[in-house]
């Protein structure tokens, strides 16, 4: 199982222990099927300081059964491959990494054809072996969320990417929307993931507010995924737990401040202590 713990290069960004956290504004389906909304979300993510925007790429009929309660919502929010390519190009033009979570083989093929620099495996699909095979065969740096996964299930997914030498990061994740009980987060799980899999770790945040993601970075997360919306009161399953532009900006500012505070080990007085040094008493 030993191999990873290397930087991951995504477009012109390095994700790694010596680099700032890679922050994903998870648009998902919060555009509600509107290209105009999707463009606005890209713009606002860029203004907030996010590293990336992430979408969901799928054909509704291949994602859920027609009688599934969420079928109509997913169908309404489905964006064509052609329009997604336009959105990705726009995000790239303004300096954001754009990528997606594919939910079917055709979507993986589309994302591979347009050379998407990163792919994401949703928690729901960590046991979907055929899809994992398809994604890992794309030979594209990937992120896996571990929500709901047992140790053996995560081992199997990890081994698939590791055997093919596909760069991988694993996100600690609680699949509750939103998370109500903060004690269920168990953020120290990231230490376990890092020790077991020897790869970069991060956190997929389904809490309300910025504090949890800031905490995650303080504890070593190198990737943060946070759902993003223009309006938390919009209709749809994810808006309520998503950060709006103001909250996203506050979260990212807090993360960057924490990264400055972490710094490096020091010994002896630092320049800011010099004026006070004269007041030390040795006796």
Image: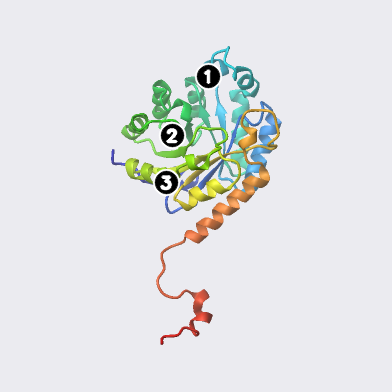
In the image, taking residue 180 as reference, residue 247 lies left or right, namely right
Identify the image quadrant of the C terminus: bottom left
111 is higher (above) or lower (below) than 69: below
Left or right for 249, reference 130: right
Label 2 crowding class (10 Å Cα cut-off): few <14, some 14-19, many 20+? many
Q: Which mark is residue 146?
A: 2
Given contact means CB atoms under 8 Å apart, are the residues at marks 1 and 2 in contact? no
Q: Nearer the viewer, mark 2 or mark 3?
A: 3
Mark 2 and mark 3: span between their CA atoms? 14 Å
Q: Which residue is mark 1?
A: 63
Q: Identify the residue position indicated by label 3 in the image.
A: 188
Element marked by disc 2: loop
Of residues 180 and 102, the one drawn nearer to the viewer in this rendering:
180
Nearest to the observer: residue 79 or residue 126: 126
Q: Is residue 30 above or below residue 12?
A: above
Q: What's the residue at 60%, 41% (across, down)?
A: 208
Q: Earlier in the sequence, mark 3 or mark 1?
A: 1
- Nearer to us: label 3 or label 1: 3
Quarter of the image for residue 23 reads top right
């Amino acid at each position: 199982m030993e191999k990873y713990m290397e930087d991951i290069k995504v477009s012109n960004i390095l994700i790694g222990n010596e680099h700032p956290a890679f922050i994903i504004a998870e648009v998902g389906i919060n555009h509600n099927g509107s290209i105009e909304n999707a463009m606005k979300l890209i713009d606002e993510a860029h203004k907030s300081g996010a590293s990336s925007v992430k979408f969901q790429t799928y054909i509704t009929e291949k994602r859920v059964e027609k009688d599934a309660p969420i079928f109509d919502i997913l169908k309404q929010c489905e964006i064509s491959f052609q329009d997604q390519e336009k959105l990705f190009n726009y995000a790239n033009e303004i300096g954001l990494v754009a990528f997606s979570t594919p939910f079917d083989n055709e979507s993986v093929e589309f994302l591979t054809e347009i050379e998407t620099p990163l792919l994401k495996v949703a928690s729901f699909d960590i046991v979907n072996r055929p899809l994992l095979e398809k994604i890992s065969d794309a030979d594209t740096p990937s992120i896996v969320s571990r929500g709901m996964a047992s140790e053996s299930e995560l081992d199997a997914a990890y081994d698939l990417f590791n055997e093919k030498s596909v760069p991988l990061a694993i996100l600690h994740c609680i699949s509750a929307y939103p998370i109500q009980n903060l004690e269920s987060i168990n953020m120290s799980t990231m230490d376990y993931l890092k020790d077991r899999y020897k790869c970069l770790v991060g956190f997929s945040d389904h809490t309300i507010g910025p504090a949890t993601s800031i905490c995650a970075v303080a504890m070593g997360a190198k990737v943060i995924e946070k759902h993003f919306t223009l309006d938390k009161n919009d209709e749809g399953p994810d808006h309520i737990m998503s950060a709006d532009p103001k909250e996203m900006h506050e979260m990212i500012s807090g993360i960057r401040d924490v990264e400055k505070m972490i710094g490096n080990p020091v010994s002896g007085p630092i320049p800011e202590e010099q004026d006070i040094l004269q007041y030390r008493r040795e006796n």
